[in-house]
Image: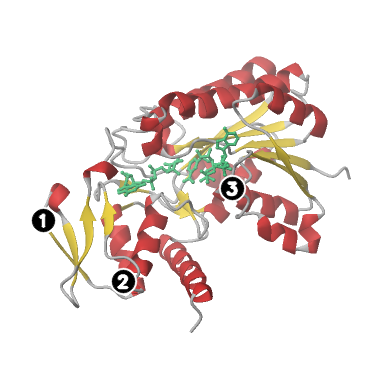
């Protein structure tokens, strides 16, 4: 059988790292697209080179979603059987600071890949995955969000991803491209970026426990997120491209928690007992053992408008892809904490 060849835009990100390893284990040849950066940006995938069975099928190439020529040349040269578009300016809060750039990368970047597939006449030769997000539901009032829920994006990030979602459907219907949208709810892992709230909470609480940091500053403690594990979610991406027909799928756990509940869960596992007091920006979390303030709120971590409530209904993925999440939020937190403690202990051996 012909070897499957995957091209991953966004290979250096959290999902790019998990997906590369999944596809390499499935014996794909994997080409990953990285951006030129002034400091090494391949930390999440460097371990691939330590595994003799994986590294021979893994190739990194330079490219950028803002550069049509690089996208076209890569697809023309590699002629992949599957393309995964995971590249994005993926931080919601930052998208308010760099709205035009976020729209360019996340929205037009997706269009550029689809145009390259069309112009190279590869419509029937390549399958395409687009990394959509629950942020497209934004300020929806629906209790559970499914593929049928209307989009109401609440950030330049959410709006740019909504465009990418629509244009993916448009190219599927207009040109017959096998193109799928994953509508993925928040998913985390030990290699989650440090400025997303889960990783920020875990890293800060461990540093505080070790006496390296005094306080953790957060924004809105009451938004609710449906958190899964990246390993489960990249498996769903792959499953979407193995179906007979292209379609769009919500990927979620169906459970959600507030940021405050996440803090409490992580704090308990790290060994803190927290007492909360105050309201709004004045709310504080105090370490019961010594009376010291552990957590405070800061205005700059609040967003101009918030997505209050995300909870996904992934029944379609269960029915058609036979997909369901395997890792609970508690196991996820435990894994993130263990990973962080290992880094700390390796840095400061006893
Ligand atoms: P991430 O860790 O932020 O990774 C984003 C990737 O995109 C990185 O490899 C980054 O490169 C790359 N990138 C950024 N701008 C680029 C550009 N102009 N050209 C080419 N590459 C560029 O994100 P993630 O958590 O893995 O998420 C993967 C995708 O799923 C993203 O599209 C995200 O929006 C979407 N998504 C994520 C979640 C989630 O909860 N994680 C949920 C739903 C959807 P550098 O490493 O050089 O920065
Ligand atoms: O961890 P977050 O930054 O993730 P957010 O905004 O939900 O976006 C992530 O998930 C999306 C899927 O729904 C992805 F599409 C997107 O790419 C990204 O991966 O924030 C989660 C919540 C927000 O309500 C935010 O206001 O945590 C709240 N929060 C409170 N304090 C904070 C903080 N978020 C961050 N990043 N930093 C804080 O200090």
Which label is found at residue 32?
A: none
Residue under the point 72% across and 19% down: 118
Element type where label 3 sits in the image: loop
Spatial CA span between label 2 and label 3: 36 Å
Residue 87 figure quarter: top right
Q: Residue furthest front?
A: 38
Q: Could you say which is closer to the camera, residue 199 or residue 245?
A: 199
Residue 127 figure quarter: top right
Residue 322 visible in the picture: no
Q: Which is in the foreground here, disc 3 or disc 1?
A: 3
Residue under the point 34% across and 66% down: 205
Q: Quadrant of ligand 2?
A: top left
Q: Position of residue 225 (x, y in %)?
A: 35, 48
Q: Which is in the foreground here, disc 2 or disc 3?
A: 3
Q: Residues within 10 Å of mark 2 (few under 14, many from 20)?
A: few
Residue 289 visible in the picture: yes
Residue 306 figure quarter: top left
Residue under the point 79% across and 52% down: 27
Q: Residue furthest left?
A: 278
Report which residue position mark 1 lands on: 278
Q: Which is in the foreground here, disc 2 or disc 1?
A: 1
Element type where label 1 sits in the image: loop
Please report whichever mark, 3 or 1, sits nearer to the chain's N-terminal start: 3
Q: Residues within 10 Å of mark 3 (few under 14, many from 20)?
A: few
Please report whichever mark, 2 or 3, sits nearer to the chain's N-terminal start: 3
Report which residue position mark 2 lands on: 268
Report which residue position mark 3 lands on: 39
Q: Position of residue 215 (x, y in %)?
A: 26, 62
Q: Residues within 10 Å of mark 1 (few under 14, many from 20)?
A: few
Q: Could you say which is closer to the camera, residue 263 or residue 233?
A: 263
Element type where label 2 sits in the image: helix
């Amino acid at each position: 059988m012909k070897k499957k060849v995957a091209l991953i835009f966004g290979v250096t990100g959290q999902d790019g790292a998990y997906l590369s390893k999944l596809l390499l284990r499935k014996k794909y040849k994997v080409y990953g697209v990285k951006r030129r950066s002034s400091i090494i940006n391949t930390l999440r995938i460097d371990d691939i080179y330590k595994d003799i069975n994986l590294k021979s099928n893994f190739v990194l190439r330079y490219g950028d979603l803002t550069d049509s020529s690089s996208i076209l040349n890569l697809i023309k040269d590699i002629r992949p059987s599957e393309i995964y578009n995971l590249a994005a300016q993926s931080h919601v809060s930052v998208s308010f600071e760099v709205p035009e750039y976020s729209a360019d990368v996340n929205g037009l970047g997706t269009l550029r890949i689809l145009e390259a597939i069309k112009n190279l006449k590869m419509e029937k030769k390549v399958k395409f995955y687009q990394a959509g997000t629950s942020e497209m539901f934004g300020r929806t009032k629906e209790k559970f969000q499914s593929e049928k829920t209307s989009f109401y994006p609440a950030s330049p990030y959410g709006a740019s991803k909504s465009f990418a979602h629509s244009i993916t459907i448009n190219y599927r219907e207009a040109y017959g491209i096998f193109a799928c949208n994953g509508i993925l709810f928040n998913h985390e892992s030990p290699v989650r970026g440090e400025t997303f709230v889960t990783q920020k909470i875990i890293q800060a609480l461990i540093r505080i426990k070790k006496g390296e940091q005094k306080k953790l500053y957060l924004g809105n403690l009451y938004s609710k997120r449906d958190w899964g594990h990246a390993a489960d979610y990249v498996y769903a991406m792959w499953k979407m491209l193995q179906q007979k027909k292209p379609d769009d799928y919500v990927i979620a756990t169906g459970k959600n928690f507030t940021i405050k509940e996440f803090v409490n869960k992580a704090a308990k596992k790290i060994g803190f007992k927290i007492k909360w007091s105050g309201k709004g920006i004045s709310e504080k979390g105090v370490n019961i053992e010594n009376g010291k303030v552990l957590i405070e709120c800061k205005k700059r971590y609040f967003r101009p408008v918030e997505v209050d409530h995300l909870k996904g209904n992934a029944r379609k993925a269960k029915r058609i892809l036979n997909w369901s999440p395997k890792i609970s939020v508690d196991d996820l937190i435990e894994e993130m904490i263990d990973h962080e403690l290992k880094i700390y202990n390796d840095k400061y051996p006893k």
